[in-house]
Amino acid sequence: MILPKQYRCTHSPTCQCTRGHLSEDVLLLVFQHLNWNPKLVATLSCVCKWFDDFAKRVLWKEFCKTRAPRMMLDLQSSGSHCIDGNWRALGKLLIYCSGCTQGGLFNSTVQIPGHFVYRTRFSRTLGRSLLPPQCRTDVLYVSDPCEHLDQGEEGDVGLFRGIFKSFPTSRVRKVIINKAVPFHPSEVCPYCKAKLWSMLQAKIIPQSACIRLEAYEDCIEYFVCLNGHLLGICTLAPLSDSEEAVPSEDSNHTEKKQDNGLVKENGLKRRHSLLGGSENGPSPQKRLTSSNQCDIDV
């Protein structure tokens, strides 16, 4: 005998939701009509544990598949289960820049609050450039840097995030474990609350990363958590850095170049708290396009 599925609240005996729920099929149709609005999904999750469980199992999964279908198809291909049970964390990663705090994960001197990002591009090509040569068989999707301009001594700050496919079996994870890189003593992943490894401490940040991110050399740092979520920071290099400072009617050209050097120096001081780096000047940057990318609109 087939018993009908019971829909009940698991919040508490006194919860108002015990009077009955709409069926999952009805809620699915409602949110499909709302185009899986992430703010409404998050609001529903706060009602009680039953709604929260339904959102984690169904709604966040449909949101991710609708917003980034090719990326989700790739992450789940070849028997990968990297996002099973983590749909809410992945949904948050797609649309939320976690920011940074003074003296926090990135040991930054600026305070950048977290915020929603209404248009994001995740690129597998960019992710490959952030991996060392021995690990480039791994699959990593990374967003374009979220630009936070004119952050005082830090200059133009870029914050980026990403996710590994099949991180438990990835080469990056094996390298980190073989090098016995310790977890961050206090900070955790803002998306899934898992512990974090520093790629800078592991010494596996390639030079190609600064070129692809259009950032100053040795001013890049990123972390990866146990679930394969990546988050990083860089000091963005102005496009004018590729040009030589020459005398002109506006003498600010030379002054600006000196200011850019000061910004890079301040960025290096933060990185050196974990690992010593070179003091070379910024390298000329070129804009590169990503051939394997995924656009996400919220």
Image (cartoon, rainbow, N blue to C red):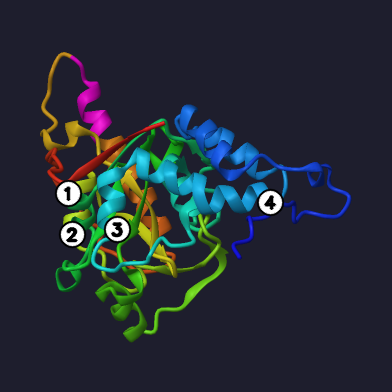
Q: Is the magenta stretch mostly helix, strand or loop?
A: helix
Q: What residue type is labelled 2?
A: Gln
Kindly identify the residue that appears in the image at 27 percent across and 49 percent down.
71
User: Where in the figure is residue 35, as x and y percent of width and height?
Assistant: 45, 30
| Whole-number angstrom distance, CA of label 4 to CA of label 3 | 31 Å
User: Where in the figure is residue 222, as x and y percent of width and height?
Assistant: 37, 59
User: Where in the figure is residue 15, as x and y percent of width and height?
Assistant: 84, 47
Q: In this view of the protein, can residue 109 be seen by the observer?
A: no
Of the numbered discs 4 and 1, the one sitting upstream in the chain is 4
For label 2, the residue is: 207
Residue 261's quadrant in the figure? top left
User: Where in the figure is residue 204, as x and y percent of width and height?
Assistant: 26, 70
Q: Disc 3 vs disc 1: which is toward the camera?
A: 3
**Viewport quadrant of the N terminus:** bottom right
Q: What residue type is labelled 3?
A: Leu
Q: Which mark is residue 75?
A: 3
Q: Which of 132 and 65 is in front in this view?
A: 65
Left or right: 197 in relation to 31 = left
| Whole-number angstrom distance, CA of label 2 to CA of label 4 | 54 Å
Of the numbered discs 3 and 1, the one sitting upstream in the chain is 3
Disc 2 element: loop
For label 1, the residue is: 211
Of the numbered discs 4 and 3, the one sitting upstream in the chain is 4
Q: Residue 126 carries which label?
A: none
Q: Nearer the viewer, residue 163 or 232?
A: 163
Q: Disc 2 vs disc 4: which is toward the camera?
A: 4
Range of residues picked out in magenta: 250-257
Q: Circle 1: is it few (<14), some (14-19), or many (20+) Cα within 10 Å?
A: many
Of the numbered discs 3 and 2, the one sitting upstream in the chain is 3
Q: Disc 3 vs disc 2: which is toward the camera?
A: 3
